Image (cartoon, grey):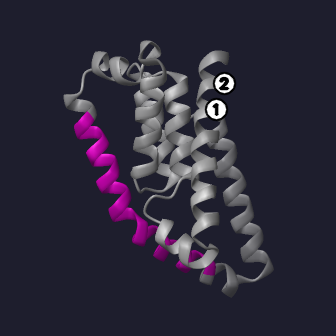
């Protein structure tokens, strides 16, 4: 475990101890709620991580490099942007996936496009957005988000 993980874990344990000191029952209720939340997201997390592991077992780093690597250019960015917009998963799972793709030949630009579109574009949530925010606003927000994801990817691709 690296230093950052140690620091975060020690801070979490320290805050938990302080919570127990302040109000034992409230801290226990919070722990129970947290464990229920963990249990509810664990199946999806396991499935997504398993799918990524299986895909990475069969897809060579050269293939990843071809589709999402330095030489993929604008096409690689657009593929990653599309994948991020369509894939429906918590962003927290997107980061380790992006790290694996980066370690297997992916480039910074496409990875940035994937992460930003994953977090900013809601293909599956657009019906809800339209019902709450209106069609014009929801569509404009998603289009602007796609453009911004593309710009961010280009900038990172140039800078890194």
Left or right for 93, reference 116 = left
Q: Is residue 32 magenta?
A: yes
> Which residue is rendered at x = 42% and y = 42% of the image?
82
Is 138 located above or below residue 70 in the figure? below
Q: How many marks?
A: 2
- On-image quarter of the N terminus: top right
Left or right for 68, reference 130 = left
> Which residue is rendered at x = 63% and y = 73% of the image?
133
The residue identified by callout 2 is 155
Residue 48 in view: yes
Is 116 located above or below residue 47 in the figure? above
| Extreme-top residue of the structure | 71
Along the line of sight, the residue nearer the viewer: 121 or 136: 136
Magenta stretch secondary structure, dominant? helix
- Do labels 1 and 2 touch, CB within 8 Å? yes
Q: Position of residue 157 (x, y in %)?
A: 59, 20
Left or right for 19, reference 78 = right
Along the line of sight, the residue nearer the viewer: 93 or 84: 84
Q: Position of residue 106 (x, y in %)?
A: 43, 23
Q: Which structural element holds mark 1?
A: helix
Is 71 located above or below residue 90 in the figure? above
Along the line of sight, the residue nearer the viewer: 61 or 63: 63
The magenta region covers 30-55
Residue 160 in view: no
> Which residue is rendered at x = 64% and y = 40% of the image?
148
Q: Position of residue 99 (x, y in %)?
A: 47, 32
The residue identified by callout 1 is 151
CA separation in Å, label 1 and label 2: 6 Å
- On-image quarter of the C terminus: top right
Q: Is residue 29 magenta?
A: no
Label 2 neighbour load within 10 Å: few <14, some 14-19, many 20+: some
């Amino acid at each position: 475990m690296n230093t950052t993980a140690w620091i975060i874990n020690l801070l979490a344990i320290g805050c938990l101890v302080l919570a127990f000191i302040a109000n034992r029952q409230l801290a226990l209720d919070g722990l129970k709620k947290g464990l229920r939340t963990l249990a509810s997201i664990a199946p999806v997390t396991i499935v997504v991580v398993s799918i990524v592991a299986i895909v990475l077992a069969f897809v060579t780093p050269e293939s990843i490099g071809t589709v999402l690597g330095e030489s993929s250019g604008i096409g690689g960015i657009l593929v990653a942007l599309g994948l991020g917009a369509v894939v429906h998963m918590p962003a927290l799972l997107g980061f380790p996936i992006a790290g694996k793709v980066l370690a297997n030949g992916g480039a910074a630009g496409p990875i940035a496009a994937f992460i930003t579109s994953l977090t900013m574009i809601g293909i599956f949530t657009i019906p809800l957005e339209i019902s709450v925010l209106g069609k014009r606003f929801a569509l404009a927000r998603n289009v602007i988000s796609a453009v911004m994801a593309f710009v961010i990817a280009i900038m990172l691709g140039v800078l890194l």
